[in-house]
Amino acid sequence: AQKVTQAQTEISVVEKEDVTLDCVYETRDTTYYLFWYKQPPSGELVFLIRRNSFDEQNEISGRYSWNFQKSTSSFNFTITASQVVDSAVYFCALKTSYDKVIFGPGTSLSVIP
Amino acid sequence: DTAVSQTPKYLVTQMGNDKSIKCEQNLGHDTMYWYKQDSKKFLKIMFSYNNKELIINETVPNRFSPKSPDKAHLNLHINSLELGDSAVYFCASSRGQLNEQFFGPGTRLTVL
């Protein structure tokens, strides 16, 4: 069965600190896709990144970076020099070829000015 | 140019009533979804349609009935509303079933 774990329920950091959000997944499928979504206090869900299981290259987009490690079944998300606007709930999600998408429980990030 | 829109944004109703939520996407996607987000922010898929065909039907009470009149629309009708149905309902769409999903703004349903 597929599963996504985000062990950090809530994180608080002071502005300009770096923060890493953990995501650990479980699947027996060899082909799968991992996603991160952001849900700011306004409530909408915003897509951040998609990664397939054959591409372990890390990705950087501005202050955001993602570390995909198949050996540990993890797809962690780092925000560098955090800002107040980064305050949100962040969801990691897993999609395999033959099953529905599974969302993790989310990590609530608070960036304190 | 709203990509995925839902109406209404807020819905307050009495227990036992029937209500509908409408969803439209203008992205040309072939797959649409309904999710329920509870008070603890947990997101759970309810239904998924691909080219107007139901492909995912999770363990949802049969009081919930989705309808897809065309690829751009996926509506959700709920009969005999219960207190436990109070939640935020999100519609989403994607190009195929393996790509990222684009979400609507959500409909906050409150059952009194």
Image (tube, coloured by chain):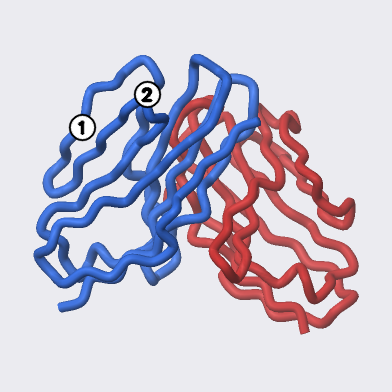
Chain colours: A blue, B red
Left or right placement of residue A88 versus residue A15 in this view: right
What label does residue A72 carry, if any?
A: none
User: Which mark, by number, is residue A70?
Assistant: 2
SS at circle 1: strand
> In the rendered view, would you say A58 is above or below B47?
above
- Assign a secondary structure to mark 2: helix
Query: Could you say which quadrant of the image residue A8 lies in?
Result: bottom left
Q: Position of residue A73 (x, y in %)?
A: 41, 30
From the image, state whether disc 2 or disc 1 is nearer to you: 2
Give the chain of mark 1: A
In this rendering, position of residue B30 left or right of residue A16: right
Label for residue A59?
1
Residue A52 higher or lower than B82, as above or below: above
The quarter of the picture where the C terminus of chain A appears is bottom left
Residue B100: x %, y % from top left: 44, 35
Identity of the residue drawn at 37% across and 54% down: A38
- Relative to B104, residue A4 above or below: above
Q: Where is the N terminus of chain A found, in terms of image quarters? A: top right
Label 2 crowd bin: few (<14), some (14–19), many (20+), radius 10 Å: some
- Which image quadrant for residue B70? top right
Residue B69 lies in what quarter of the image?
A: top right
Q: Is residue B1 visible?
A: no
Chain at numbered mark 2: A
User: Whole-Å distance between the Cαs marked 2 and 1?
Assistant: 15 Å
